[in-house]
Image: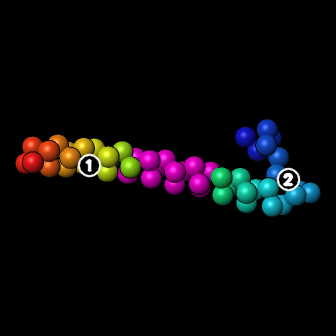
């Protein structure tokens, strides 16, 4: 893996940017899972509210 992607010696900021991107993607995936969970709860709440009304 390191041989395919050598560490950038001329631009050291590139590695940190890559880490930021992977972290952002990880956070986005977690938030999307939470959003799906919240969406499911929201649908249940809407159905409950609709049934009461």
Q: Nearer the viewer, residue 29 or 45?
A: 45
Residue at label 2?
8
For the view shown, which residue lies furthest in the top direction?
4
The chief SS type of the magenta part is helix
For the view shown, which residue lies furthest in the left direction?
52
Residue at label 1?
42
Residue 48 seen in the current view: no
Q: Nearer the viewer, residue 1 or 25?
A: 25
Query: Residue 30, position in %: x, y?
Result: 45, 51
For the view shown, which residue lies furthest in the right direction?
10
Tell me the crowding category of disc 1: few under 14, some 14 to 19, or many 20 or more residues within 10 angstroms, Cα based: few
Residue beneath the point at 36% across and 45% down? 36
Q: Is residue 4 above or below residue 52?
A: above
Q: CA distance from mark 2 to mark 1?
A: 47 Å
Residue beneath the point at 87% across and 58% down? 11
Which of the two labelled residues, at mark 2 and mark 1, occupies the earlier sequence position? 2
Mark 2 falls on what kind of element? loop
Q: Nearer the viewer, residue 6 or 20?
A: 20
Magenta residues, start to end? 22-34
Count of residue discs: 2
Examine the structure image and report whether residue 2 is included in the region drawn in magenta: no
Tell me the crowding category of disc 2: few under 14, some 14 to 19, or many 20 or more residues within 10 angstroms, Cα based: few
Q: Which mark is residue 16?
A: none
Nearer mark to the viewer, of 2 and 1:
1
Residue beneath the point at 20% across and 46% down? 46
Q: Is residue 17 left or right of residue 38?
A: right
Residue 41 seen in the current view: yes
Residue beneath the point at 7% across and 48% down? 52
Query: Residue 19, position in %: x, y?
Result: 67, 56
């Amino acid at each position: 893996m390191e041989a395919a992607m050598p560490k950038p010696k001329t631009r050291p900021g590139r590695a940190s940017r890559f880490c930021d991107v992977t972290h952002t993607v990880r956070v986005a995936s977690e938030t999307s899972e939470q959003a799906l969970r919240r969406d499911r709860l929201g649908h249940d709440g809407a159905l409950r509210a609709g049934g009461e009304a």
